[in-house]
Amino acid sequence: MGAKTLIATLRELQAGTLVAHKQDDAAVTFAPILSKEMGKLDFSKSAETIHNLVRGLKPWPGTYTSFRGKGLKILQTKLCPKETCLPQTKGKADGSLFVSDKRLYVVCAGEALEILSLQPESRAAQTAQAFLTGAHLTEEDRLG
């Protein structure tokens, strides 16, 4: 819909037939000022909610959590199809990490969210695969 509207608007602008409409001041909404605290991840929320937060707060203020008592920025995620990942989340607490096919996942409200890239405290950004090489995850490891 947006692409079609943009094309139609550009054609009207080029033809000189574009008619301006005053915005209704009563319908105006304001976005809140972003703060660093908005980026703190709560893994009791759905995977889709967290995925959208990671995308929406990039690059600033970014999203973060903790891992083994240190800060961890989550830079990029990918939703996992429920039929594929849901069975692997059974019995796991929110924030639990698991690996499947050399991919890193976190449990979010009983769903799985794939972590594609992250940045451990005082380290450079890295892929999840690079993180897994050095992290040596255990069953007890959790985010948050």
Image: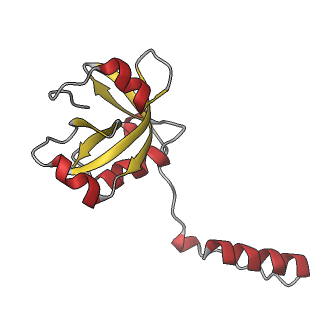
Q: Is residue 83 left or right of residue 48?
A: left
- 141 vs 61, nearest the viewer: 141
Judged from this view, the residue extending furthest toward the right is: 15
Residue at 85% from the left image edge and 85% from the top image edge: 17
How far across and down, in percent of the image, does residue 83 sit? Answer: 26, 60
Instruction: Say which of 44 and 126 sits in front.
Output: 126
Residue 24 x, y percent position in the rendering: 59, 76
Residue at the far front: name it.
101
Q: Residue 99 placed where, x, y %? A: 28, 36
Residue at image location 19% in from the left, 25% down from the top:
138
Q: Up-down: is 116 above or below 17?
A: above
Name the spot of residue 143 as percent of width and height, x first.
26, 31
x 79%, y 82%: residue: 19
Q: Quick one: 135 or 69, which is closer to the camera?
A: 135
Instruction: Decide: is 125 above or below 104.
Output: above
How many numbered tags mark residues here?
A: 0
Residue 112 seen by the camera:
yes
Q: Residue at x 25, y 20 (%)?
A: 68
> Residue farthest to the left?
91
Q: Which quadrant of the structure image shows residue 100? A: top left
- Say above or below: 73 vs 55: above
Which quadrant of the structure image shows residue 7? bottom right
Above-or-below relation of 62 to 18: above
User: Relative to residue 20, is residue 86 drawn left or right?
Assistant: left
Quadrant of the image containing the C terminus: top left
Left or right of residue 96, residue 51 in this image? right
Using the rendered image of the protein, determine whether residue 42 is visible from the camera's viewpoint.
no
Quarter holding the N terminus? bottom right
- The scheme the figure's colours follow is secondary structure
